Image (cartoon, grey):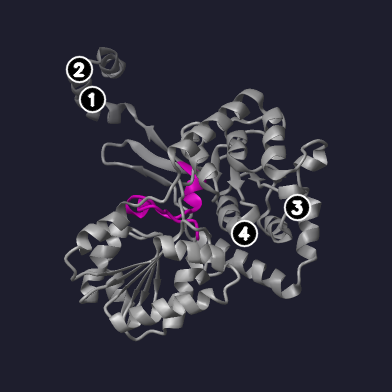
Amino acid sequence: MQFLRSSDEGFEKAFARVVRNRREADTQVARDVASIINEVRERGDEALIDYTARFDAHGLGADSDWQITAEDCRAAYDALDADLRDALDLAAARIRAYHEGQMPADRDYTDDIGMRLGARWSAVEAAGLYVPGGRAAYPSSLLMNAVPAKVAGVERLVVTTPTPRGEINPLVLAAAHIAGVDEIWRVGGAQAVAALAYGTKRIDKVDVIAGPGNAWVAEAKRQLYGVVGIDMVAGPSEILVIADENNNPDWIAADLLSQAEHDPTSQSILITDSESLARQVEDAVDLALMKLPTAKTAKASWEAHGLIVVVDSLDEAPALSDRLAAEHVELMIDDPQALFGRLRHAGSVFLGRHTPEAVGDYIAGPNHVRPTGRRARFASGLSVLDFMKRTSFIDASEAALAAIGPAAVKLAEAEGLPAHALSISTRLK
């Protein structure tokens, strides 16, 4: 774990190194993924059978080996402890309500020359959702991806998920039931992404692929963008906590570790104007790691990528935060709204001491799929718009074309495109 002071001589160089550190897939992963994609494209289901046996120790033979039925999902939901079932239902309801508010409005108007203009929004026909298995079997991620797709109006919602040794988390099945998933396939990894993009004899292709995954899944989405739409290329989780001295160090330590426990490549950062708090948080992290069941992963992340920055004033924090453009930013200060107003780049912001990032992962409502790796400079979290497209339209009357057509002809001739000019001028009388 690094400990930096903004007043130290070498701070700028050290902080710039943190900003540049991508913590993402290397060239070998890219080569492996390209090979997997090509195999699935060429060999289809046979490639899926081979990769699933190799990576998941699961045989894809009969239909029951390939798919999980709606009846299985309903049974998993019914079998849940009542409190847990209620928690999933509440999360889904809040996620649905928030995303219903994101639905865009169509536009249709006639301008002052009598030309009708506008745009119409529509959902993609089919969307594929990748749901991790193994270390990261998260029903919350399924809800965060599936619910916005259904709200957008996607007709066919397809989930692919690895089932190591044939096993699957029943919570994931219950979440699929709540969200109304149409198909679930027992396939994971880059090969699942390729199958969704190109289609196979068994699995029909989709228009958009969303959902988190490991480095191979993220790289497959990156390579297949253009063949299919994607939500984003997501890397390791990140959290930045900006805190003043009036904080409980145990709370901050827990918040930092909430992301560190995801993966050894996750990153947790604290910026504070109190060296006393910084040292207390450092100690609190060490103590928490002694009790945390996920300590092995969290400790590896904290030791390799953790960072505490002590600044002379929190006025320095917005500029540092914007350079990091972190996935999650917590503002644990007396006046979080004022500092929030000065931030430009963040995947999501959590205002105040009683708003831990983890509440956003599950139940608050906004989507927890957010840009990582400094992509919050130009990207946003998952929304209904990731499952929709906008079609513009133009309806020109004879008078409207006469009003602007000559200018269009001039521009076409200036660009050396005479057929463009002719297609307009031949209509002008």
Residue 191 % position (x, y): 61, 36
Q: Secondary structure at mark 4?
A: loop
Q: Secondary structure at mark 2?
A: helix
Mark 3 and mark 4 in contact (Cβ < 8 Å)?
no
**Image quadrant where one finds the N terminus:** bottom left
**Image quadrant where one finds the C terminus:** top left
Residue 308 % position (x, y): 34, 70
Residue marked by disc 1: 408
Q: Residue at x 20, y 76 (%)?
A: 312
Kindly identify the amino acid type of the residue bearing the numbered disc 1. Answer: Ala
Answer few, some or many: residues within 10 Å of disc 2's Cα (few below 14, many 20 plus, some between 14 and 19): some
Q: Earlier in the sequence, mark 3 or mark 1?
A: 3
Kindly identify the amino acid type of the residue bearing the numbered disc 2. Answer: Glu
Q: Earlier in the sequence, mark 2 or mark 1?
A: 1
Closer to the camera in the image, 336 or 57: 57
Residue marked by disc 3: 167
Closer to the camera in the image, 166 or 400: 166
Q: Is 145 in the magenta? A: no
Mark 1 and mark 3 in contact (Cβ < 8 Å)?
no
Kindly identify the amino acid type of the residue bearing the numbered disc 3. Answer: Glu
Q: Which residues are magenta?
A: 368-389
